[in-house]
Image (cartoon, rainbow, N blue to C red):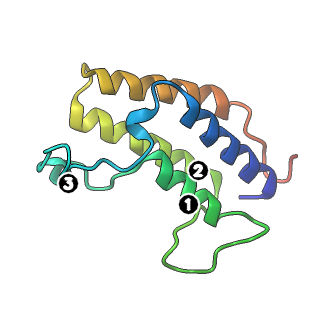
Amino acid sequence: MDMGQWLFCSATILKLKKQNFAYPFLRPVDYVMLCLPQYPSIVRNPMDLSTIERKLESSNPEHLDSNPDHPRYLNVDEYIADVRLMVNNCLLFNGPENPVSGMAKRLEEAFDEEIKNIPAPGEV
């Protein structure tokens, strides 16, 4: 991921977080507080916008985080895959007709509109 792509991805996550239907995805699912003991057995790889944002911060090409305990994105495809994972986890756990799944689909639609303009490597 080069600097232009990193800046674009960082701006895209901020835009997604500001959507009025993004609130269920801002933080990791607190399945204990929500009384959802089955959540970790259904959703094996949880993902949320704050985790994606944290991974992006560690991926800044000008200030790469060398701590191996801080995951980062090596390329744009990994970033896109995490956003898709977050949406797919929601659909898997809640089912396609659940209102939260509808919010996930709207978030994915907004994301898809944004990433149409993602710069190619080396493009600014």
Is 53 situated left or right of 61 in this image? Answer: left
Residue positioned 68% across, 30% down in the render: 116
The residue pinned by badge 3 equals 40
Lower sequence index among marks 3 and 1: 3
Residue positioned 64% across, 74% down in the render: 65
SS label for mark 3: helix
Residue 67, quarter of the rendered image:
bottom right
Spatial distance from mark 3 to mark 1, Cα to Cα?
21 Å
Q: Amino acid at mark 1?
A: Lys
**Residues at badges 2 and 1 in contact (C-beta under 8 Å)?**
no
SS label for mark 1: helix
Q: Residue 26: where, in percent of width, then height?
A: 45, 42
From the image, which quarter does the N terminus lie in? bottom right
SS label for mark 2: helix
Q: Amino acid at mark 3?
A: Pro
**Vertically, is 23 above or below 50?**
above
Which of label 2 and label 1 is nearer to you?
1
Q: In this figure, what is the number of numbered marks?
A: 3
Q: Nearer the viewer, residue 38 or 34?
A: 34
Q: Residue 64: where, in percent of width, then height?
A: 70, 72
Q: In the rendering, which numbered label is found on residue 55?
A: 1
Q: Nearer the viewer, residue 116 or 19?
A: 19
The residue pinned by badge 2 equals 77
Lower sequence index among marks 2 and 1: 1
